[in-house]
Image (tube, grey):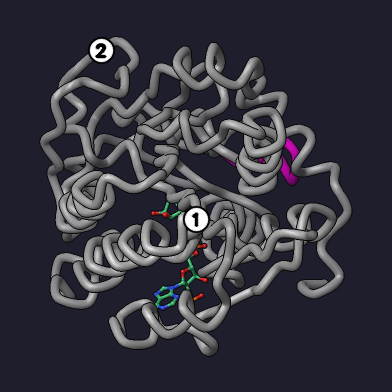
Amino acid sequence: MRPTILVTGANGQVGFELVRLLRPHGDVIAADREKLDLAEPDAVVGAVRGARPALIVNAGAYTAVDRAESEVALAQAVNARAPGILAEEAKRLGALLIHYSTDYVFDGKRTTPYPEDAPTAPLNVYGATKLEGEQAIAATGGHALVLRTSWVYGLRGRNFLLTVRRLAAERDELAIVADQIGVPNWSRALAEATVRAIVAGLPALAERSGVYHLSATGQATWHEFAQAIVGDVARRRVVPITTAEYPTPARRPAFGVLDTERFETTFGFGLPEWREVLARCVTSPVDPIVA
Ligand SMILES: NC(=O)c1ccc[n+]([C@@H]2O[C@H](COP(=O)([O-])OP(=O)(O)OC[C@H]3O[C@@H](n4cnc5c(N)ncnc54)[C@H](OP(=O)(O)O)[C@@H]3O)[C@@H](O)[C@H]2O)c1
């Protein structure tokens, strides 16, 4: 029998890719915000009990990092309470939950990649609510994989790649922060790795429960990432600036590179270097829904 798979945030960068990639593996219920509002606890419970999935992939999240500073309750409801409810309901059904989290659970004071068990200390509301979500999942004691990743981009949605492309078309010069270091990750590569891990991990996937860092390798500043993007589009000057010169409501970690060894040894594969992934992304056909 084909398993039922519930995907939340089905219209998000990662969720959209997951829905397509998971279809060959089960009956996918693609729940976007209209079908399932993660801020509504009763709706979350109802969706899981109605669908009775074997697998829940929670790709929905409140990801507006700056707005979260002033919408704390909503960010908390979506990023912390909803994952806890999903985990609780998954446990009742004997289902597995796959959930995404972020490098923003860390304070960015390290200079070498963060392992999963490094102390967490989020600098902003988004990171704090995502950490609460991880903790709510762990507290249920159910079967769950929490995949922390960073700097997600793609050819649809709202993200740095599309913003830089737009700015490059409008301006001769772009000023981009050069003192924050992280790793860009294409949404499709993350979804592909998630599905591959599910398949590689069967039949004992539930026994691999825990937190994993899933990311491309290498590292970059936002400035280097922008240069790599603009290099493909047009000749534009990309000027490095400091975080202090680009004040935002939310503080961001200066360093967010994730150590991916645990994921690689557990599932037997990892993602390539971020530039290689970016090259694949920008040469992939534009999604017909967006075009
Ligand atoms: N984006 C990043 O840079 C980044 C970095 C590290 C980790 N992550 C994590 O990776 C995962 C996937 O992120 P992503 O990049 O795919 O984010 P995304 O593109 O912003 O997608 C998130 C989806 O969640 C939906 N959502 C927001 N509030 C909701 C609600 N109340 N009820 C139901 N759905 C709701 C959004 O709907 P709308 O489209 O209607 O807003 C959106 O479709 C998330 O867990 C995120 O925290 C992301």
Residue at 62%, 40% in the rendered image: 194
The answer to whether one can see residue 150 in this image is no
The amino acid beneath tag 2 is Thr
Q: Is residue 2 left or right of residue 162?
A: right
Instruction: Confirm or deny contact between disc 1 and disc 2 (CB under 8 A).
Output: no
How many numbered marks appear?
A: 2
Dot 1: what SS? loop
Whole-percent x, y for residue 2 in the image: 78, 60
Whole-percent x, y for residue 155 in the image: 69, 57
Dot 2: what SS? loop
Q: Nearer the viewer, mark 1 or mark 2?
A: 1
The magenta region covers 230-237
Q: Which residue is mark 2?
A: 111
**Is residue 232 in the magenta section?**
yes
Q: Is residue 271 above or below residue 88?
A: above
Q: Which residue is mark 1?
A: 95
